[in-house]
Amino acid sequence: MKTCTLSINNKQITVPEETTILEAAKKLNINIPTLCYHPDQKVKANCRICLVHDKSSDKFVTACSTKVTDGAEILTNTQEVRDLQKGVLELIIANHPNDCLNCIRSGSCSLQDLCRRFNINNSDMINNIDTYVIDNTSGVLVRDRNKCIKCMRCVEVCQETQMVGVLSPYNRSVNTNVGAGFNTNLDKTLCTFCGQCSSVCPVGAIYENDETEKAWEAINDPNKHVVVQVAPAVRVALGDELGISRGEEVTGKMITALRMLGFDKVFDTNFTADLTILEEGNELLHRIKTGGTLPLITSCSPGWINYAEGFFPDLLEHVSTCKSPQQMFGAVAKTYYAKKMDIDPAKVFVISIMPCTAKKFEAARPDINSSGFRDVDVVLTTRELTRMIKSAGIDFADLEDEEFDTLMGTSTGAAVIFGATGGVMEAALRTVYEKVTGEILTDIDFHDVRGFDGIKEATVDLAGTSVKVAVAHGLSNAYKLMEEVKKGNSEYAFIEIMACTGGCLGGGGQPVRSTKLVKARRMDSIYRIDREMPIRKSHENPEVIQLYEDFLGNPNSHLAHELLHTHYKKRSDELV
Amino acid sequence: MEKLITDDALYHKIDEIIAMHGASKHNLLAILLEVQEINPNHYISKDEVIYISKKLDTHVSNVFNVMSFYSALSDKPKGRYVIQICNSTCCKVSKYEKLQEMIEKELKIKVGETTSDGMFSLEYSSCFGACDISPAIKIGHEVYGMLDQLKLKRIIESYRGN
């Protein structure tokens, strides 16, 4: 490998030749300011805040996009460079509303951080702030074009990672902004509400519709019995903004905090993840046995469901009819749980904590109420729960560990891995293998379906029949598998699709700044939880067994179908 | 998207234009310019944009991006004749503003507007190479220069007569 030796602020460093100045400086513990730069994305170099002085050519170059050269002398901290960077910053904030006090991203805003770093107190610049109407038509994602700094990170995620293509730049020069075609409001677009845009936005230009007030209201309503469920990926991300190192598991503290917030029962979505495996596993076996539509595709990820309904409406019969674990939980809580506890189901109020923005959309689907009530009443993202915990003044990092309530709180290792890409597949294989072969699965780790490869595949021997399965995460990878299904040359029997890169642990509702590095830590934590679980197969979950015995009968029974399954339909032609 | 097609002949022509250039998003600009040309009101409607994006297998937002970037493309209807006043350097030196005033008075509209009878729209243009006869205007493919009040009146009347 060829290397370059250069000096940055008079310190020598030798790095591989393709390294950028930004990366080289980082190795010398120098953080050059950035805004549009994102470690998991392409270099854009459009914000210009990372300008540094290349003394050898006597030019100011953007550190994020400029590769090192041998013998270069780079200066990042001279008066000239500081003035230049500060000037760029002042130009950006002259076009940015200064309502930090009531901005949802205050405290996690890259622009705000830079203003502190450059000690911006007063600017001579005349403010020229846009007055676009804020778009909260979707009730899921809020788009505030006034705050957009045109870094184009959301565009890359929407166009390339997800291939949804709703967000694009439009107009030019000072009028440039980002939006859907014809500036259509988000509710009239093919947006999947995956929320990845809100996850990469450095400022408050696109964010989740905050529903914490609805949660507080329910908690404080004596006529409501408020039940909370927590998705598997939340427990490895909630600590991120609460004084715990990123990606560390915080299940016990999380349960304690939820009780302190005042929820009547603290349950686990993992319980219904196990339930999902039994329903979906049976659906798969039934389809294989009866020559039904294959490949069967998972339905846990609402971003994926929205994508399928919008972009592959002719292939919806491939998608499992199983509701997602979130919805199954709601349906079971308002029937089985209410009955067992002798509570009027009308008083049961289900709040779910999700790593996901699309879950808000899913819970609000008009036809998802087979119990007679809306399955899930309020969906909060990990970010919103973080906000509630801070608001209640809870010292999260110092909390003792507590356990989930019983009846819908016990789960298995198979359920927690739902939070990582490949997890649903692995959990399904653990159960389906034993159901088909009647043998005990000795090595239950399916390493082929783990990890960050965009598309993963595995072949499993089920009593002499070899079955091929595949896993995709990130909708651009889903697109590839779906094109095969469309052409009729897909060789898989079962496909798991998650809308977000890394699966739910990288969901659009997770704490911002979820880079690939952070996602990898979350993934490690999830598989560690799985390893340490006493039960690791869904069909051995005692509470799920009890649920079938006492209430549902068998997987795919009439009642199970009514409560736990749903259907999909093409999204409107009017959407752009 | 089929139901969006209201004018068979128009969409048939769009198909022809796309076929001629090749149905690839790389030919988007050329296709848009020609589609706009066949529209009597010199614009591309939202339905047409959606139709073209489907045909080119690209997102509506991307076509809108291109549409909004180039001032030569419009998503709103214009008059039958679009009068473009050059406001680049040479015409600025030759005081295009005076010419603009004359046109605005004659047509009773401002730049950016369309006459109530839908005949004329008025807009600025950057240089189209008629510096030798500046201040210049362009109507469709015709360029007119060295204009005075009388000449201008005659030109506008000739279009009105059509």
Image (spheres, grey):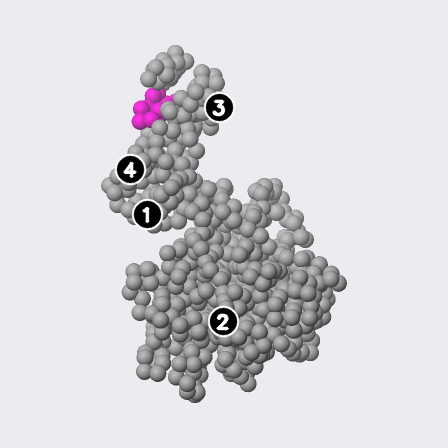
The Cα atoms of the two marked residues, 4 and 2, are separated by 53 Å
Disc nearer the start of the sequence (3/4): 4
Chain to which the residue tagged by mark 3 belongs? B
Residue A271 in percent (x, y) is at 56, 74
Disc 4 marks a residue whose amino acid type is: His
Q: Look at mark 2 in the image and give the residue it sits on.
A: A557
Q: Chain of mark 4?
A: B
Q: Which chain does tag 2 point to?
A: A
Q: In the image, is A48 to the left or to the right of A230?
A: left
Instruction: Say if labels 4 and 2 share a chain.
Output: no
Residue B56's label in the rendered image is: 1
Asked if A304 appears above or below A397 in the picture, the reply is above
Give the magenta part as a residue range. B131-145
> How far from the left and from the top, in percent, is residue A36?
49, 56
Are the residues flagged by discs 4 and 2 in contact, CB closer than 8 Å?
Answer: no
Asked if disc 3 and disc 2 are in contact, CB closer than 8 Å, the reply is no
Question: Distance from label 1 to label 3 (Cα)?
Answer: 37 Å
Q: Residue at x 72, y 65 (%)?
A: A392
Q: Are marks 3 and 2 on the same chain?
A: no
Q: Nearer the viewer, residue A368 or A246?
A: A368
**Amino acid beneath label 3:** Lys
A549 is within the stretch colored magenta: no
- Residue beneath label 4, please? B12
How far apart are labels 3 and 2 at the CA level?
Answer: 71 Å
